[in-house]
Amino acid sequence: MKDTIFALSTVPGLSAISVFRISGPESFSVLKKITNGEKPKNRYATLKKVFWEGEAVDQCIVITFEKNESFTGEKTVEIHCHGSIAVIEKIASVLMKIGSSLNLRPAEEGEFTRQAFYNGKMDLIQVEGLADLLKSETEAQRKISLGSLEGVVSKKIEEWRSKIIAILAFLEAGIDFTDQDLGELPVLNMIVDLIEIIKTEKNSFQSIRSIKEGLDIAIIGPPNVGKSTLINYLSKREVSLTSRIAGTTRDIIESKVLINGVFVTFLDTAGLRETRDTIEKKGIAIIKKRLKSVAFKIFLINKEADLNKIGIKACDEDLIFKAKADRGNNTRFIGISGKTGLGVKKAISLIEKKLPKIYFNSGSIATYRQQSKISDLLDVFLGLELGVKEGLEAELVAEKARDGLKLIEELTGRIDTEEVLGIIFKSFCIGK
């Protein structure tokens, strides 16, 4: 018999309301033990007193869900109690005591979601979307994860699956009806079409990853050009030491800022110049290495000749600003001042244009696991295309198509999921 599980599904501590969730075949029996009267009408909020050993514990709102109507797909009871520590601890202890007579135990991390997965309420991509949604900090992250949770990605993957089945059916028709001239062109077109779709999806992952994880932007320039002052202005707090003495910044100082729904980490770097100072040399070496992984660079200069002296070439995607523009600007670049804020609004507008857009196509792959499976899928169909072009036997080509179908099922969690689920659910809270 399946276990019935329970957990506090809200954050423990003082609050107006806390919610206990009970899920499993004995859920209604548990409710019967702690309340009087008839079971509440399913999916209706009902005021009920919770009792234990003849004593009232709390006055609660109770909601019941029949099997297949709940989030988990199991019989479920939600108890909305008052959010005091005393009430929470009392109800938890009562449920623990009931566990000795009924098949009831505390839930493990993500176990309610695990029930939902096994009961077909959600696939593995939706599970990952929920995990990401619970961790989301920005509007962009919310939109990405919600698209996965609502099944937008799963629907897209299911369309791929239908295309693969059509390709496989065509190939197997060639096997079964060898006396018919089916030709290779139609199936080749189907394969090439699917390859292009998968390539587009794979290439979109970098932008999605940047939105989920944020971007690094390095602020570089000669010593004492005002990099630290600018990063303090952008951060709206003093995160970097400023001084009139050149070479104050010896290490990389990071400040995370939310811009247009995307986390941007500005890197305040050591001033780039020729120096004999050993520590300053190390700082410059560190920043040159770090520059290889940044999204783009912001150059701050005093004069145009600085661009030739700092030893770093400005690329097309980089931005160049004349620093300390409150003192004047004799260059062809936009002037900004971290001291007064002059031109900073314009600078942020230019930075925003370079950030990944929140209005991406809804339903994009969003995890490294998904990216890995899609990369494997692409390799399979590139091999399939080559096999058809080279006249490989239909049976062998069909076997490659079956490999693609298997990858689709791994992607959605129809097969090969236990180890993956264990990793994913470790990131869930107990009550989810």
Image (cartoon, helix red, strand yellow):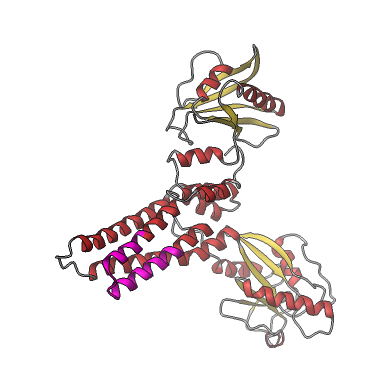
At x 64% / y 25%, what residue is drawn? 96
Q: Is 281 placed above or below 31 here?
A: below
Can residue 150 be seen here?
Answer: yes
In which quadrant is the C terminus drawn? top right
Whether residue 366 is visible to the viewer of this picture, yes or no, is no
Q: Nearer the viewer, residue 203 or 414?
A: 414
What's the residue at 60%, 47% (across, down)? 427
- Which is nearer the eye, 427 or 251? 427
* Image position, residue 369 (x, y; %): 51, 57
Residue 159 screen position, x and y as percent: 34, 55
Q: Residue at x 61, y 42 (%)?
A: 429
What secondary structure prevails in the magenta region?
helix
Magenta stretch, residue numbers: 375-402
Would residue 337 be found to the left or right of residue 165 on screen? right
Which image quadrant for residue 195? bottom left
Q: Is residue 24 left or right of residue 14?
A: left
* Residue 203 image offset from top left, x and y in percent: 46, 67
Image-based side of 399 in relation to 23, left or right: left
Q: Locate residue 143, reporting x and y percent.
A: 51, 52
As for residue 396 lying within the magenta part, the answer is: yes
**Observer-nearest residue: 381 or 66?**
381
